């Protein structure tokens, strides 16, 4: 009864406030939603306490429950790779020797959430879930811990890896001194994990890195006085991490810069504790969490930077609520999930960014290749790719076939600002052999954005090779 009253009071307060670019969506639940994930502007999922999994296929205008409510289950993370395949991680609340405990569980769906099946983890009731991340429908990492609180427990943090969508798990790292918090996967081979004693809020977090799919981990840096439980890979070298404060590295985890709104506290200013982080490139970062002066004076807060943390601005502030998760789907919108089933949506994610900042968010510009089509056996035996940079960056340009195999790397170097030209003559890296007819892709990648162009290679009239390039820009 008390929770229903709090939910009603929160909704009443929210609806009495005016936020022109934000709308509250009816989730249909009144539990705390811990995580939210959208794969496009229409399809999204949110998870939370009491075994809550809800989904939308119309951009959040309506939400439907996908999992029967279970009081003894708390879901903490949701990760969908596409509209069909997704994973949910959390804990089953147990009673062991007269005390409450938590046992890690991971669920998987292959039909968009119509059916969920449990992925069997190979550890007992005293190992609890903390984080997970997947790079595709088969390969991912899950972090679980045993705090050593039980009489027969052994304190231990463990990383588990799956290569078949959670059917089997392999231990890739154990630590008896530290527990694992956040995970951040850049791709299948490269990932970060964050480890701390978890005895005190101001413990340091050690950062570990793997470049061979978790077979070996190396300690590469330390984040001081924070227990990192959320992290995002922005590029090869840029990673953001958060829990009591926010931290960023631009050198692959060796050194970190932090922002702290928890301490010290200015007179009359509430302490802000971030609970989730989202990044679109290295400069546009969203943080959501809770601001408070006491446990009875809470506000859900969204803050944002469009210049890599040089300045931050508050974009949303809701009294009597807490924000737990944020997801930004390109330029289609921002979703926030939090206490009492709150879900907020905003379509204008760049409304607060001025024109200069918006330009800075795109690190390079790519022109249409020329000539198009190209006849290899004519006087012009190559296609030209032009791109311009606004600042010095490491740029890689690679040709791929339709199976994702590398055909040829055209450029991999630190490149100065200005206009640049690279060419491709239709040959592979293997002895300069001309490629077969078919569809290919060239990809331009920097620290923040990727541009992919589809290349159609056609042999016609015997020895004529034409290349037609259709420009498709995808920001990642």
Image: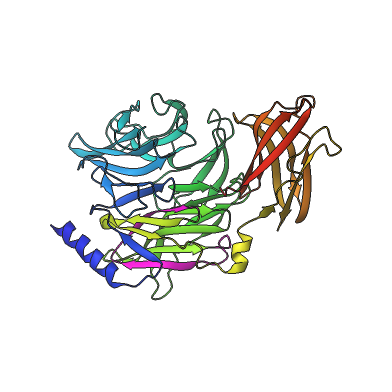
Q: How is the image coloured?
A: rainbow
Residue 262 in sight in this render: no
When the figure is inspected, residue 372 is found, relative to residue 9, above or below; the finding is above
Residue 102 highlighted magenta (yes or no): no
Residue 423 in sight in this render: yes
Q: Is residue 377 left or right of residue 77?
A: right
Most extreme residue toward the front, as rendered? 461
For the point 38% across and 69% down, the residue is: 270
**Relative image position of residue 62 (x, y in whole percent):** 29, 52
**Relative image position of residue 296 (x, y in whole percent):** 26, 66
Residue range (magenta): 306-330
When the figure is inspected, residue 331 is found, relative to residue 99, above or below; the finding is below
When the figure is inspected, residue 291 is found, relative to residue 71, above or below; the finding is below
Q: Is residue 118 left or right of residue 143?
A: left
**Relative image position of residue 238 (x, y in whole percent):** 59, 49
Dividing the picture into quadrants, the one containing residue 156 is: top left
From the image, which quarter does the N terminus lie in? bottom left
Residue 324 highlighted magenta (yes or no): yes
Most extreme residue toward the bottom, as rendered? 267
Question: As rendered, which of 171 and 384 lies closer to the eye?
Answer: 384
**Relative image position of residue 131 (x, y in whole percent):** 40, 41
């Amino acid at each position: 009864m008390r929770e229903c009253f709090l939910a009603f009071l929160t909704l009443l307060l929210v609806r009495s406030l005016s936020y022109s670019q934000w709308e509250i969506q009816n989730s249909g639940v009144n539990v705390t939603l811990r995580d939210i994930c959208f794969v496009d502007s229409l399809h999204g999922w949110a998870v939370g306490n009491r075994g809550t999994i809800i989904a939308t296929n119309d951009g959040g205008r309506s939400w439907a429950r996908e999992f029967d409510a279970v009081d003894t289950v708390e879901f903490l993370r949701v990760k969908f790779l596409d509209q069909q395949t997704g994973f949910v991680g959390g804990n089953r609340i147990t009673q062991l020797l007269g005390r409450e405990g938590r046992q890690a569980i991971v669920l998987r769906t292959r039909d968009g959430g119509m059916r969920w099946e449990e992925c069997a983890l190979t550890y007992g009731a005293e190992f609890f879930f903390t984080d997970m991340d997947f790079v595709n429908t088969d390969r991912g990492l899950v972090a679980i811990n045993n705090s050593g609180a039980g009489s027969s427990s052994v304190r231990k943090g463990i990383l588990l890896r799956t290569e078949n969508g959670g059917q089997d798990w392999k231990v890739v790292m154990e630590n008896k001194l530290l527990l694992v918090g956040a995970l951040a996967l850049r791709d299948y081979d490269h990932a970060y994990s964050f480890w701390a004693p978890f005895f005190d809020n101001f413990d340091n977090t050690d950062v570990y890195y793997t470049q061979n799919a978790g077979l070996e981990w190396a300690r590469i840096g330390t984040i001081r006085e924070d227990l990192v439980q959320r992290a995002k890979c922005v590029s090869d070298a840029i990673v953001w991490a958060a829990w009591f404060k926010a931290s960023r590295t631009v050198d692959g985890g060796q050194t970190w810069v932090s922002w702290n709104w928890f301490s010290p506290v200015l007179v009359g200013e509430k302490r802000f504790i971030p609970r989730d982080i989202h990044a679109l490139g290295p400069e546009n970062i969203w943080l959501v969490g809770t601001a408070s002066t006491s446990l009875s004076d809470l506000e859900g807060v969204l803050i944002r930077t469009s210049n890599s943390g040089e300045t931050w601005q508050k974009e949303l502030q809701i009294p009597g609520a807490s924000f737990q998760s944020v997801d930004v789907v390109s330029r289609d919108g921002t979703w926030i999930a939090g206490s009492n089933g709150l879900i907020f949506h905003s379509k204008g994610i760049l409304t607060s960014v001025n024109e200069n900042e918006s330009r800075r968010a795109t690190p390079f510009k790519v022109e249409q290749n020329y000539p198009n089509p190209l006849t290899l056996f004519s006087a012009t035996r190559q296609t030209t790719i032009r791109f311009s940079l606004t600042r010095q960056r490491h740029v890689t340009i690679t040709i791929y076939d339709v199976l994702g195999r590398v055909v040829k790397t055209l450029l991999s170097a630190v490149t100065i600002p200005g206009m640049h030209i690279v060419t491709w003559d239709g040959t592979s890296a293997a002895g300069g052999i001309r490629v077969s007819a078919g569809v290919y892709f060239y990809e331009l990648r920097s620290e923040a954005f990727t541009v992919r162009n589809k290349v159609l290679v056609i042999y016609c009239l015997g020895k004529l090779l034409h290349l037609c390039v259709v420009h498709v820009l995808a920001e990642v």
